[in-house]
Image (spheres, grey):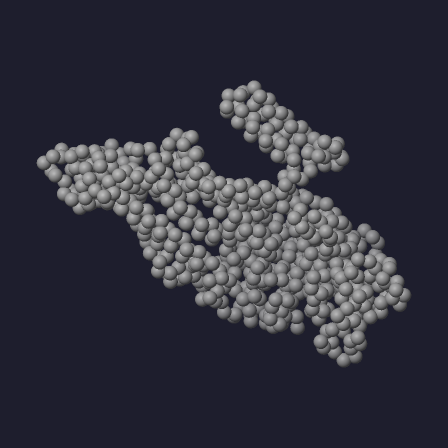
């Protein structure tokens, strides 16, 4: 009887039809495709990407095809689509296209070549800065969300303080006191490691017990750091840092990255807090899977959707920040062209040569707009609540 | 049966398990009280047998499950699994023993990772088991899917493509992937259609026969528990009120709460009908949790003694325990 029942259930079950196979990617494309603005954003994004890559190859090297730094003083402030005066130019000064597609600036440099070069700068600044901020954001948010309930003890704070201030003093050439602090810190760590086995069983003496009291939870610490970072007007923070550090494109990328990770941290933490309570995470723990595999294999793929959206919009704001910095003269140093400093150079000639202002300005507008539209489209397509409607 | 032999027989023994959750209030998050989710739960499960844990919603059944799995840290008590006291184990010490005890969840929608294919989810367990070769894992995976009655070609699909019953089968396959000897079924059928409930129950029974598994079956459906379980523990507000073999609970219930639960079964057959006046209506009083018997505000046979004294969980017959003065006198 029992055996019969089993075969019946199994047979019945195997015949149960499965829903037509549709991956999440297909579902995503179906939803994304309905949003025309987002598709347009994506297309412009791809176009911009190709231009930037092409720009890198066409404008660099010893003999570039489009030379962004070639000065032709005879040909300054030429409007777009104008033909060069071939009588005045030497053969190597003739523009590659035989006309100035986007005109020339006040030193007679080809604006099209400069825009191409600037596209690469904008692209790398956008992607690297956002890459840095997303990495920091995922790391901090992941720790706050997953290990948030663990407490940091007073001695942890003390020796971190010693370590940081010691390293700082050594770097500032106050070697003696710096080394003393580092040694103190090292001695404490050695002491803790040596007494670790004993301390678990024996009661602590009162001062060690005090050092072992829980000071603040990991979650509180990280989220308050986020709050503090958000209090700074970030553009002025960047201005200050850039004024101190030597001007280079890498410093700008790093600084933009280091001042924009807070949003991602909040997103990732919020996602992790809700994911941590889900049954599939409990099941993974019950199977005996390690913490890092749970974080990166089981939880992270479920938490990336909002991060992806904020990263896309973050690229737009990083491009905008870089253009703003360059416009103020704090950006990428002069021989390199960026959209910001083309704009800044053009503002003196806005009535004589409006294209110097409008071409980079409108390009920035279009690129930033397309990134934002693409980001919004991503958000709509990845949002499970919107998906249920279909 | 001598004690050593008996200990070998017992796969899981839980003694006086307690878990209190703090209630935090105000700006400084001061602890203003405690929710006694699990307040002194004790039971034993024999190897190859099934114990049912029944009780109303919020009485701490799931917390007991999570405590046994060590997903929650317990406050007091002992969990002895196959003679090994795992109650004091740290996360690190626990990890090698994790695969021994597995769980099947109530919600078939939340229990599978939506971003992993079903095959990947089940394969995680095979990795833990230490099967390195990809082809061996694949073969084992297909075997597991077949065991739970799923076709092997469903492994590269995502959870949202399956129905609730199918997902519950996949959840069972995942639990089986690490070859456990003890599985906690946390209301595995309460989210399913009645027709599918029967399939899952039969599947669990077949697996027990084939693999010699032991179950802790958590449910609030007494009919199912009576059909599936060898012993039954009845919980109320974090305490076990009565614990006995399934026949004893159904034929000879001593605790008034058990009696009222049995009376509430819609159709328990002629001759078994109990008086439906065992429960005081709308009499639930949470202050009853503070002192004396926790059940007294609902109890039809409440006495002054129930208000003052802590009721002990005592033996009232062969393998029959109850937490009631009246039951002891019988």
Q: Nearer the viewer, residue A212 or A111?
A: A111
Q: Inspect this view and state whether residue B213 appears.
A: no
The residue that appears at 64% across and 57% down in the rendered structure is B103
The residue that appears at 83% across and 52% down in the rendered structure is B3
Q: Inspect this view and state whether residue B203 appears.
A: yes
Residue A66: percent from left, percent from top:
22, 39
Q: Nearer the viewer, residue B47 or B272?
A: B272
Residue B86: percent from left, percent from top:
72, 47
Q: Nearer the viewer, residue B99 or B277?
A: B277
Instruction: Locate the N terminus of chain A by quadrant.
Output: bottom right
Query: Please, is residue A357 above or below residue B199 in the view?
Result: above
Q: Which residue lies most toward the top here? A: A176
Residue B149: percent from left, percent from top:
57, 65
Q: Which residue lies most toward the left here? A: A87
Residue B238: percent from left, percent from top:
75, 58
* Quarter of the image where one finds residue B106: bottom right
Instruction: Locate the C terminus of chain A by quadrant.
Output: bottom left
Q: Taking B245 as reference, is A331 left or right?
A: left
The residue that appears at 22% across and 37% down in the rendered structure is A106
Q: Which residue lies most toward the right here? A: B329
Q: Taking B110 as reference, is B182 left or right?
A: right
């Amino acid at each position: 009887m029992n055996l019969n029942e089993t075969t019946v259930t199994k047979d019945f079950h195997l015949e149960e039809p499965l829903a037509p196979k549709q991956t999440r990617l297909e579902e995503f494309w179906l939803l994304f495709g309905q949003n025309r603005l987002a598709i347009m954003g994506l297309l412009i994004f791809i176009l911009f990407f190709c231009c930037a890559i092409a720009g890198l190859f066409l404008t660099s090297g010893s003999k570039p095809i489009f030379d962004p730094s070639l000065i032709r003083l005879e040909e300054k402030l030429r409007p777009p689509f104008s033909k060069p005066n071939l009588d005045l130019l030497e053969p190597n000064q003739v523009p590659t296209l035989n006309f100035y597609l986007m005109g020339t600036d006040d030193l007679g440099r080809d604006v099209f070549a400069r825009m191409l070069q600037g596209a690469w700068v904008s692209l790398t600044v956008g992607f690297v800065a956002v890459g840095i901020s997303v990495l920091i954001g995922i790391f901090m948010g992941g720790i706050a969300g997953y290990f948030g309930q663990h407490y940091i003890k007073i001695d942890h704070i003390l020796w971190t303080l010693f370590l940081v201030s010691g390293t700082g003093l050594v770097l500032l050439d106050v070697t003696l006191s710096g080394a003393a602090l580092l040694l103190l810190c090292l001695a404490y760590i050695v002491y803790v490691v040596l007494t670790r086995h004993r301390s678990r069983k024996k009661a602590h003496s009162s001062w060690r017990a005090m050092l072992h009291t829980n000071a603040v939870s990991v979650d509180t610490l990280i989220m308050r750091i986020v709050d503090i970072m958000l209090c700074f007007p970030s553009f002025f923070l960047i201005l200050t840092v850039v004024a101190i550090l030597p001007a280079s494109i890498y410093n700008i990328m790093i600084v933009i990255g280091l001042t924009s990770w807070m949003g991602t941290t909040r997103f990732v933490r919020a996602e992790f807090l809700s994911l941590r309570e889900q049954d599939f995470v409990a099941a993974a723990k019950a199977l005996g899977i390690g913490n890092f595999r749970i974080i990166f294999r089981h939880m992270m793929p479920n938490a990336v959707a909002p991060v992806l959206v904020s990263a896309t919009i973050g690229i737009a704001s990083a491009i905008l920040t870089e253009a703003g910095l360059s416009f103020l003269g704090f950006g990428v140093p002069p021989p390199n062209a960026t959209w910001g400093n083309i704009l800044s150079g053009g503002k003196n000639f806005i009535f004589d040569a409006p294209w110097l202002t409008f071409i980079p300005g409108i390009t920035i507008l279009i690129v930033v707009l397309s990134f934002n539209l693409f980001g919004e489209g991503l958000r709509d397509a990845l949002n499970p609540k919107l998906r249920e409607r279909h | 049966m001598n004690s050593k032999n008996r200990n070998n027989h017992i796969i899981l023994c839980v003694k006086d398990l307690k878990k209190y959750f703090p209630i935090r209030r105000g700006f400084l998050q001061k602890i203003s009280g405690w929710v006694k989710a699990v307040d002194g739960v004790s039971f034993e499960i024999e190897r190859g047998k099934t114990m049912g844990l029944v009780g109303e919603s919020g009485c701490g059944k799931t917390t007991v499950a999570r405590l046994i799995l060590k997903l929650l840290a317990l406050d007091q008590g002992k969990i002895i699994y196959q003679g090994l006291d795992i109650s004091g184990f740290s996360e690190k010490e626990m990890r090698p023993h994790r695969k021994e005890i597995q769980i099947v969840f109530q919600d078939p929608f939340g229990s599978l990772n939506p971003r992993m294919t079903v095959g990947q989810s089940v394969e995680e367990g095979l990795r833990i088991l230490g099967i390195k070769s990809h082809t061996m894992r694949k073969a084992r995976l297909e075997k597991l899917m077949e065991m739970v009655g799923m076709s092997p070609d469903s492994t590269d699909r995502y959870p949202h493509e399956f129905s609730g019953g199918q997902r519950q089968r996949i959840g069972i396959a995942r639990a089986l992937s690490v070859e456990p000897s003890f599985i906690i079924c946390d209301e595995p059928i309460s989210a399913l259609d009645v027709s599918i409930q029967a399939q899952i129950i039969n599947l669990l029974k077949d697996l027990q026969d084939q693999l010699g598994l032991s179950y802790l079956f958590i449910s609030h459906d007494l009919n199912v528990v009576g059909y599936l379980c060898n012993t039954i523990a009845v919980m109320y507000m974090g305490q076990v009120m009565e614990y006995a073999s399934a026949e004893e609970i159904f034929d000879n219930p001593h605790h008034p709460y058990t009696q009222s639960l049995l009376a509430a079964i819609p159709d328990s057959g002629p001759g078994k009908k109990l008086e439906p006046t065992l429960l005081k209506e709308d009499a639930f009083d949470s202050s009853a949790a503070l002192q004396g018997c926790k059940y007294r505000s609902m109890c039809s046979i409440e006495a002054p003694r129930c208000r003052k004294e802590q009721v002990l969980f005592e033996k009232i017959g062969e393998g029959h325990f109850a937490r009631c003065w009246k039951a002891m006198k019988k």
